[in-house]
Amino acid sequence: MTRVTALFLQRRRRERLSEEEKRALEDAVAEIRVLPARHVLVHQGDTVTRSTMLIEGLMCRYMDGRDGHRQLVALHVPGDFVDLHGFPLEQLDHDVATISRSKVATFPRETLLTLTRNHPHLVRMLWFSTLLDAAMHREWIFRLGRLGAMGRVAHFFCEMKVRLSLVGLSNDNRFHLAVTQADIAEACGLTPVHVNRVLRQLRDNGQLAFQRGMAHVLDWHALKVTGEFDDAYLYVDGTPD
Amino acid sequence: MTRVTALFLQRRRRERLSEEEKRALEDAVAEIRVLPARHVLVHQGDTVTRSTMLIEGLMCRYMDGRDGHRQLVALHVPGDFVDLHGFPLEQLDHDVATISRSKVATFPRETLLTLTRNHPHLVRMLWFSTLLDAAMHREWIFRLGRLGAMGRVAHFFCEMKVRLSLVGLSNDNRFHLAVTQADIAEACGLTPVHVNRVLRQLRDNGQLAFQRGMAHVLDWHALKVTGEFDDAYLYVDGTPD
DNA sequence: CGTAACATTGATTTCTGTCAATCCGAGTGG
DNA sequence: CCACTCGGATTGACAGAAATCAATGTTACG
């Protein structure tokens, strides 16, 4: 029997979850839903009464600027909790939305509270998963603060390739990523027009081809150099699961 | 008797710590040390055997780029844990260092593990404090991705003013912040030269004066507008503005 | 087949980085 | 007490990167 939570922390460097813990987490799922593309799940300031894990699809977290421009602060792939930060914080400081059509599992806040009482070790795993988000946030800060446009886009694709690989959604050098150039722009702090030019350069350089939601890494080493990418911050587990 | 941990989560929107929890946290302090300015406390990749709370001074977390440029990912004021992320993560993905001479309290990892077993509610407060860091990371992503140079520097000073106020280090519109223009540049993803020009503009605009480590907010409202600043992400407890 | 969303391209402007010099203030030693 | 030095701050001239403005092209889909 495959569990909807099977991808949670998959292949991450961490203590193992016991069978009992896995079952407890699985049993905490109250509901499984499908959300349409471009659907806002949580609004900034909402009081959080449940947490959500992404099972299939692509979701993001973002903040709004005064001029209406959005800045993505996270992109979520299957296996990620998309709003677990709201569990200790009780309110969220940002919006959470789908990018493509997504299947999600819902964990009621009350059930999670019970879990934390009965499974202290599982709590540390949940905590760990939110700190993985924080580590990715830090890397995004680095990306935006220190890299030029080429580096930012290259770094973005490097991260997505590794994260999708971890959950079995990229085997060779291709992977599906249902984002538009405008989404990439919102993630990388650029304009869509400039993202377009950068993608062309990466293609012409023979590093990366991206079109219609399909990324093809042409030269992984070169792409990592361009994006100054090192996957240490993703806490990938060396040992097989 | 004042506790060294008295400033922890001070004036943050959260459940209260009981007297017993406060005592347990205080008792977990193994050592109090003074670190010189510009001293690296934790290196990227180090295995974390203890956690550190800043009592007095100013510290930062940063990542190194290939060309030797640093990017700050966090700035810490008294009352902050500077490396609590390392407790669940076990290793850190970034460096932690002092900016000015700092007094810190040390919590051995083992002691914290015991705490988490005996005080489940306190664990959620520690978790909360790391997610406050994550919320600040997100705001920094927004700052870098969506604001121009003026906005970034204005936003930076807005955040520091609010955070220092929370721990009693800014009463009127002045506060001491022992950073150089180069530090501000590393936090805001700019060059020191450009930070200098922006500071001059902010001074000429009558919004902010900063010299020799002393910031003077001349027009709080205007500064917040320039930095598109809203303190919601700091989870301040019952703030009058 | 028409429409809307997305992608592409070129021309131009604006902003920030780079380079290079100078200035200033605090602490130091003669 | 006064040169000296050094880190940090300041300024100006210039180059380069990315934004902006404005079309045009392409694809998916009802």
Image (cartoon, coloured by chain):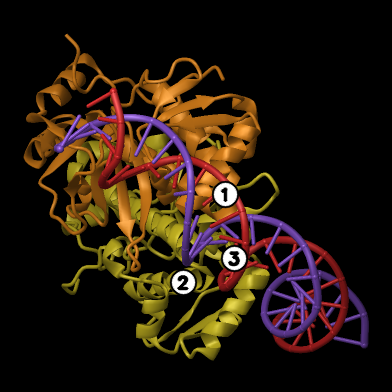
Chain colours: A yellow, B orange, C purple, D red
Mark yes or no: residue B227 visible. Answer: no
Q: Identity of the amino acid at label 3?
A: Ala
> Do the residues at pointers 3 and 2 share their chain?
yes
Q: Is residue A20 visible?
A: yes
Q: Are marks 2 and 1 in contact (CB under 8 Å)?
A: no
Which amino acid type is marked by label 1? Ala
Q: Nearer the viewer, mark 2 or mark 1?
A: 1
**D22 relative to B153 in the view: left or right:** right
Residue at the spot 52% in from the left edge and 83% down from the top edge = A202
Q: Which residue is mark 3?
A: A185
x and y percentages locating residue A240 in the rendered image = 18, 74
Q: Sort mark 1 into few (<14), some (14-19) or many (20+) by Cα contacts within 10 Å.
A: many
* Circle 3 chain: A
Q: Nearer the viewer, mark 3 or mark 2?
A: 2
- Say left or right for A122 vs B30: right
Which dot, 3 or 1, sits closer to the camera?
A: 1
Marks 3/2: CA–CA distance: 13 Å
In the rendered image, residue A54, in percent from the top left (x then y), is placed at 44, 60
Residue name at image x 57 percent, y 49 percent:
B149
* Chain for numbered disc 1: B
Dot 3 falls on a residue whose secondary structure is: helix
Q: Which mark is residue B37?
A: none
Q: Residue at x 59, y 25 (%)?
A: B220
Identify residue for label 2.
A151
Q: Could you tell me how far apart the alpha carbons at marks 2 and 1 are, in whole angstroms? A: 20 Å
Q: Residue at x 35, y 33 (%)?
A: B178
Dot 3 and dot 1 within a common chain: no
Label 3: how many residues lie within 10 Å, few (<14), some (14-19) or many (20+)?
Answer: many
Q: Are marks 3 and 2 in contact (CB under 8 Å)?
A: no
Q: Earlier in the sequence, mark 3 or mark 2?
A: 2
Q: Which residue in the structure is indicated by mark 1? A: B149
